[in-house]
Image: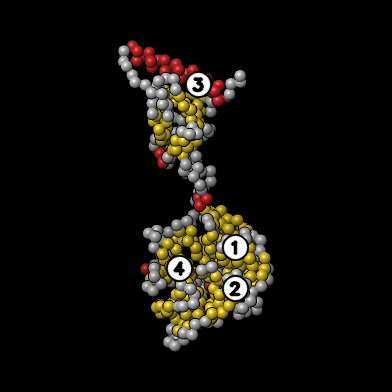
Amino acid sequence: MEISKKHTFIAKNAVGMLCVLFLLNSCLNKEYTTVETSDDATVLSLKFDENDSIPHLDEAEFIIDNDNNLIYNKDSLPYQTRIDSVFPSFTFVSTAGAALIVDGDTLYLTGNDTVDFTVQPVKLINYASDGIHFKEYDIYVNVHQVEPELFVWTQLCEAVYQHEGSSQKALQKDGRFYVLVSSGLKNYLYVSDNAAQWQMQTVEGLPQNIDFRQTLVFNGKFYVAAAGKLFVSDDASVWNETSHSDYEFVNLLYVFNDELWAVVRNVQTETLNFAESRDAQAWNEGAVLPEKFPLSDYAAFTFESRTGKAKAMVMGGITAEGVVCNTRWCTEDGELWVDYSVEQPEFGSLAGAAVVYYADRLLMFGGVDVNNQLFEGAVLESYDEGLHWAVPDTALNKLPETYAVRTNQSAFVYGTSIYLFGGRTRTQVFSDMWKGKLNKMDFSQQ
């Protein structure tokens, strides 16, 4: 009968173990001590002792899988953590002696062992206190093989379209991607299932010269404001006009607390007010817009704070008087607004930026300053909910060199990725689509 490699491996290493057990039993017999023994060689736990020269080792939490005789850490240790000089500590139900098989070499455990786990699996053999029964485990120490804080960007499409079209917006609805474009004379729609291959469709029911940049998806429908009217569509292709006798719709802001929010002009008082609706048909007029509140080229977005509070922000933009703002308006209810620029005025004036909430931070892309100059830093980030902004560590978070600095691009989050589309400079209009992802967003338990 052929003997398996596993049984041969156990037999070879059992010889050494039995020698150790023989010596232990001899010592016990000389002292005439009666010892209760167990046949259970199960491992209860493994932990790594703290090592000053290798941070994070003691953070590893190991799973003992007795059904499959495996020991492993489900959450990988940080990227580039060394595991070549580890002090392991085991606990057993019972033991008469244990050994590790490291790259073919046998190491009998003494409690003061330094182990190299870089060649895996490391095998563990433990003999129960009866000296007869034993269990064998494979030990895997998982370390992240990629930098978790690195942003990785991929160009999905070099050009969705190649015709004229400076007013544009990319959106996602029900797993499909949409690009709306206006050249000023004609409206276009492009649809894709993967944001890489696109098909053009006709657009009906909209004015020709429309600003698509504040188009929103709400309750499964598309909405855009133009010429004082609100337009709605199921598929972004065929649009229908809605109107309200008391209001002219100036623009749309965001979807917040399950409501569609807009800026409207009261036709009787001529004031500009916030308005919100749960069905985009019955509207509630809210507070008058604060002074210096932008009407165009702003970045409007919503997010949930670390305490679970829903918030909305409107950053930068251009006022009705044509002034480029440095304002950062924030609200928790759509009625009471706080301007962060009062406390932090050093934040520069900007227009045409795009902002998303992603991986516990706000990320801002593109924009121009008060002199219509492109921001040199293509990405800014904020970890305090928009109060302070800074250039991120460019070793980890920067756009590819082939991504030209621009303004008025679209940005949205879908799944675990950020999508960037289009934008323009003074001399060029872009229609490229990019997908970016923070590595750790896809890390699964290992």
Q: Secondary structure at mark 3?
A: helix
- Mark 3 vs mark 4, CA separation in Å: 66 Å
Q: Quadrant of residue 129?
A: top left
Look at mark 1 in the image and give the residue it sits on.
Answer: 176
The residue shown at (33%, 11%) is: 30
Q: Quadrant of residue 238?
A: bottom right
Tag shown at residue 13: 3
Q: Earlier in the sequence, mark 3 or mark 1?
A: 3
- Mark 1 vs mark 4, CA separation in Å: 21 Å
Q: Earlier in the sequence, mark 3 or mark 4?
A: 3
Q: Identify the amino acid type marked 3.
A: Asn
Q: Nearer the viewer, mark 2 or mark 3?
A: 3
Q: Secondary structure at mark 1?
A: strand
Residues tagged 3 and 4 counted as in contact (Cβ below 8 A): no
Q: Earlier in the sequence, mark 4 or mark 2?
A: 2
Residues tagged 2 and 3 counted as in contact (Cβ below 8 A): no
Residues tagged 4 and 2 counted as in contact (Cβ below 8 A): no
Vertical side of 207 occupied by 102: above or below: above
Q: Nearer the viewer, residue 218 or 346?
A: 218
Look at mark 2 in the image and give the residue it sits on.
Answer: 167
Q: Position of residue 3 (x, y in %)?
A: 58, 21
